[in-house]
Image (cartoon, grey):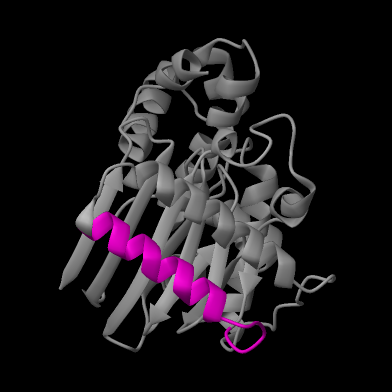
Amino acid sequence: MDELYHDDGKEMFLVHYRSGPSYQMTTSHFHMTYEFFYMMDGQRKFFIKDRTLIIEKGDIVVVPPNVLHRTTNAETPDYERLVVNVHESYLPGGGATRAEVLRPLYERDYLLLRSGTYDSSAVDALAGEMIREIRSRPPGFEAYMQSLTTQLLIACCRVLPVEEEELPPAHNPMHERIFEVVRYINEHYAEELTLQKLGEKLYVSPYAISRSFKEATGFTFVEYVNSVRVKEAIALLLGTSLKANVIARRVGFGSVTHFGRVFREATGHAPLFYRKEN
């Protein structure tokens, strides 16, 4: 296995290259950065928003900040991929002043480029240059990789179709029902959510939801509900002055103690970490 990693220490710019056997992401995954995911070889399942996509060689996914996603094993056992996380303040314009060339990045739920729908030569060259930089780490390599990241994102935005691709339905009808459950959770996370209640609401048996949820999304039912609530709590911590106990109730947690424990498990931080960072 070949693995290279760089973190600027502030969770604002990270580069992670990996080539080798498949592995399972064991934690919920959302962050305050944009994530550029380039599948250089092999195959992964990629859950994002309310859909699981099969990502293959040459495919690119760009995930906006604070969007819940997870990759899981696909049929191909070995893979190669490059992941870059970058905070908006590092991009052209820096924060409030957004560059026109990156407009799709800010307006779409996520970006998806399929292999064969764009000329990959520029992306391959930029990705290769970034891997060489992180491997040799010459003077100024971090600043240079940030520049390469901007070029990668601009290259993607240039070749995106004007209209977003309509995703095909899931091959497994039960998975399509699970994605209905996911959409309901995304919209009603502040309410009491149990397998029994969702089954009655959406006419799906609780047993079927429990059995198929992880297969379809990569998450257990409880893990996904908690992750959505934590994600929404982060948005409130960053964007409002509400107290933690008020936020806990607003996003669906029954007690501030439970909220604090789940929040730390999901993010590695106490809730007030995000308020201090903001």
Is 36 left, or right, of 156 in this rendering? Answer: left
User: Where residue 114 appears, x then y in whole percent?
Assistant: 61, 81
Q: Residue visible at 68% across and 82% down?
A: 169
User: Where residue 163 appears, x then y in whole percent?
Assistant: 84, 71
Q: Residue visible at 42% across and 71% down?
A: 211
Q: Main secondary structure of the magenta part?
A: helix
Quick one: 273 or 20, which is closer to the camera? 20
Is 173 left, or right, of 272 in this rendering? Answer: right
Please say if 234 is above or below 87: above
Instruction: Name the outermost residue toward the front.
Output: 139
Please say if 67 is above or below 246: below
Is 47 left, or right, of 202 in this rendering? Answer: left
User: Where residue 131 appears, x then y in whole percent?
Assistant: 32, 64
Residue 264 image-quadrant placement: top left
Q: Is residue 219 visible?
A: no
68 in magenta? no
117 in magenta? yes
Quick one: 256 or 84, which is closer to the camera? 84
Q: Residue visible at 49% across and 44% down?
A: 86
Quick one: 59 or 156, which is closer to the camera? 156
Instruction: Name the outermost residue toward the right.
Output: 162
Q: Report the magenta residues as a range.
A: 115-135
Please say if 273 is above or below 39: above
Please say if 47 is above or below 98: below
* Quadrant that contains the N terminus: bottom left
